[in-house]
Image (tube, rainbow, N blue to C red):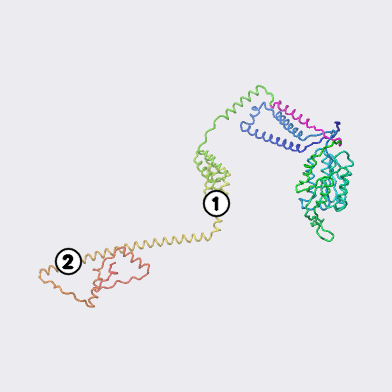
């Protein structure tokens, strides 16, 4: 192998590693800055700022910063090495073993048929890409053809150049339209003549519609010169339309001069005859380019290889060793570099003394929290979480503390929690909101009573009062009829209670009057009965003394009409009537009052006295 170097500029084989390395270095830098701020904040909490220089007298911020710069630079150099820096070239003579392989690809309008996805031409192009990836050391070339053919990519070992040529193929690159298979075979024969002493393989990829020339005669002549043709059929034997897109964006199918739709069919018979004439093989392309895979596995893979001395290849020189070595050197320097500076023994003693004092202060146990303090802390935590009911309960418990400062803060936070509770049910239960806001105002006022200069409590108190007034006015505006009905109901209730009270007083008064009359009547009747009994006794004694006979017992006789009336009057006399009880008299008066009847005067008896009986009962 002959090699020599050539100067060239710096380039990178995989430059995207540089972008990734930059992102990583920036992220590490931001992490260090955040770490320093957090460290400084923790130190200020541990000790006063004026004591920190004594505690960290041996610390060197400059050395620590230098160590970080070395560390980040080493990481950046590692990513630079991964990007494969290259500088200069060398040429190497490459000896290969392989065959000469030409691809003849049909670029006529019929290859735009969409019976294969996305169309015949694109499917054939993708199949050739996959086929070339399997080749090693074989020279390949490309011949596009339609009504004529030409060599787009001569036989070469530069597979990248072949792929670029394959990518630019389209149906417009050959102005002479049609399908001339013979011209493709003749152009392949010309290229093979320029490169002697190797196998000659032509892969003809087309839909088989030979519209010009005598393809079989051309195939026989090529076979006589050692060419083997493998034909690959693209499309559907049943035929398919050819889509056409006009400049105005309208899409249609290809039509002939008479306006009829043109259908293109796969001519397998012609392709099979070409393959048989040249001792080759015919295969359909298939939807996944299976035909090309069959040609490679069954034919090309088994062919003997020929030594090829193509040309000197230009190979870039890799320079990744230099940034990698520099990265290792920086890591070693960072490892052995100390981040502390030398200090005097006096400074060290002062620092150790202060460190011992700070450690003892930090280890000194803090006073235990009281139950009220715990309740206050739980209440504030619940308020921050939005659990206002729990916050209210804990803050009420913390009000029992003897610490007036804590009690004032508890009242203030309680007012906030009560306001939030009322705000949650403002739309659904405005009455509950009014009550809770009133309690909130009371809590703010208690907080102001403990500390009158609390501007926050005063502002919140005024705000809640204003909110409460607006809510009450809104309720009055929204429900005037309900308020009127409510006042009317209360007035009716008062009138009904007043009537019941007057009724009870009247009944009590009537009962007392009835009781007095009954007592007078009873006393009068008692006196009359005593007088009668006394008279009877005197008459009895007189008759007994006189010795008058008693009246004889006679049979009873029917009473006359006058006698019946007199008898009825006697039965209804007061002496024979039963007295009415107090309850019955009360019911009678009640029925007379409700029926609004006029009291009928007492009937006169025969003896001229008033009859105060009703239904045989005195009242």
Residue 328 drawn in magenta: yes
Residue 508, position in %: x, y?
A: 34, 61
Residue 444 visible in the shown view: no
Helix, strand or loop at label 2? It is: helix
Reply above or below: 334 against 606.
above
Q: State if disc 1 and disc 2 touch (CB < 8 Å).
A: no
Residue 54 shows in this picture: yes
Give the image location of residue 320, x and y in percent: 78, 32
Find residue 2 and report its image quarter.
top right
Q: Quadrant of residue 573?
A: bottom left
Which residue is at a point 24% across and 71% down the rendered structure image? 571
> In terms of depth relative to the viewer, which is nearer, 524 or 279?
279
Magenta residues (range): 310-339
Instruction: Say which residue label 2 marks.
Output: 534
**Position of residue 595 in the picture relative to residue 465 (left or right):** left
Give the quadrant of the N terminus. top right
Residue 321 lies within the magenta run: yes
Q: Residue at x 14, y 68 (%)?
A: 540
Give x and y (percent) for residue 423: 56, 50
Q: Residues within 10 Å of mark 2 (few under 14, many from 20)?
A: few
Q: Is residue 12 above or below residue 117?
A: above
Quarter of the image that includes the C terminus:
bottom left
Q: Residue furthest top?
A: 345
Of the pair 370 and 169, the residue shown nearer to us: 169
Give the side of residue 490 with respect to residue 194, left or right: left
Crowdedness near tag 1: few (<14), some (14–19) or many (≥20) residues, C-alpha within 10 Å: few
Q: Is residue 169 above or below residue 594?
A: above
């Amino acid at each position: 192998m002959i090699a020599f170097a050539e100067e060239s500029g710096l380039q990178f084989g995989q430059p995207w590693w540089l972008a990734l390395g930059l992102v990583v270095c920036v992220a590490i830098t931001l992490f260090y800055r955040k770490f320093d701020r957090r460290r400084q904040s923790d130190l200020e909490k541990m000790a006063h700022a004026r004591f920190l220089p004594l505690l960290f007298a041996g610390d060197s911020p400059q050395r620590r910063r230098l160590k970080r710069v070395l560390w980040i630079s080493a990481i950046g150099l590692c990513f630079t090495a991964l990007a494969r820096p290259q500088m200069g070239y060398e040429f190497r003579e490459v000896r290969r073993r392989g065959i000469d392989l030409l691809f003849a690809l049909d670029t006529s309008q019929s290859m735009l048929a969409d019976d294969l996805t996305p169309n015949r031409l694109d499917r054939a192009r993708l199949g050739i890409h996959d086929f070339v990836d399997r080749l090693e050391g074989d020279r390949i070339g490309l011949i596009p053809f339609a009504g004529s053919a030409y060599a787009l990519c001569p036989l070469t070992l530069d597979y990248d150049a072949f792929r670029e040529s394959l990518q630019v193929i389209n149906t417009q690159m050959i102005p002479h339209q049609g399908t001339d298979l013979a011209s493709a075979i003749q152009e392949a024969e010309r290229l093979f003549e320029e490169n002697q002493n190797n196998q000659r393989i032509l892969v003809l990829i087309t839909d088989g519609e030979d519209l010009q020339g005598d393809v079989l005669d051309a195939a026989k002549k090529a076979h006589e010169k050692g060419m083997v043709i493998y034909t690959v059929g693209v499309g559907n034997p049943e035929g398919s339309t050819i889509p056409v897109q006009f400049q105005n964006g309208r899409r249609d199918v290809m039509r002939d001069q008479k306006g009829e739709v043109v259908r293109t069919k796969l001519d397998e018979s012609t392709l099979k005859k070409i393959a048989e004439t040249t001792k080759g093989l015919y295969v359909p392309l298939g939807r996944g380019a299976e035909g090309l895979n069959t040609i490679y596995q069954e034919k090309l893979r088994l062919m003997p290889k020929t030594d090829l001395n193509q040309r000197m290849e230009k190979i870039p020189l890799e320079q990744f060793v230099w940034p990698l070595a520099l990265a290792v050197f920086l890591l070693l320097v960072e490892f052995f570099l100390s981040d502390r500076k030398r200090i005097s023994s006096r400074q060290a003693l002062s620092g150790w003394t202060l460190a011992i004092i700070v450690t003892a202060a930090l280890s000194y146990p803090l006073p235990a929290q009281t139950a009220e303090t715990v309740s206050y802390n739980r209440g504030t935590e619940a308020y921050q979480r939005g659990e206002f009911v729990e916050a209210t309960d804990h803050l009420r418990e913390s009000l029992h503390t003897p610490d007036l400062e804590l009690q004032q803060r508890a009242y203030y936070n309680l007012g906030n929690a009560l306001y939030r509770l009322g705000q949650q049910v403002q739309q659904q239960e405005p009455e509950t909101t009014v009550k809770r806001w009133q309690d909130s105002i009371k809590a703010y006022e208690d907080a102001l009573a403990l500390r009158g200069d609390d501007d926050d409590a005063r502002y919140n108190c005024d705000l809640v009062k204003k909110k409460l007034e607006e809510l009450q006015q809104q309720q009055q505006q929204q429900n005037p009829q309900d308020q009127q009905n409510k006042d009317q109901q209360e007035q009716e209730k008062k009138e009904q209670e007043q009537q019941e009270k007057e009724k009870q007083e009247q009944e009590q008064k009537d009962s007392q009057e009835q009781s007095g009359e009954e007592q007078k009547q009873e006393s009068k009747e008692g006196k009359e009965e005593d007088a009668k009994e006394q008279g009877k006794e005197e008459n009895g004694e007189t008759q007994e003394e006189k010795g008058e006979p008693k009246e004889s017992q006679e049979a009873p006789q029917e009473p006359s009409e006058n006698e019946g009336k007199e008898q009825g009057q006697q039965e209804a006399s007061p002496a024979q009537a039963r007295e009415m009880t107090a309850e019955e008299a009360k019911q009678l008066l009640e029925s007379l009052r409700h029926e609004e009847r006029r009291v009928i005067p007492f009937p006169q008896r025969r003896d001229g006295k008033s009859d105060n009986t009703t239904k045989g009962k005195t009242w």
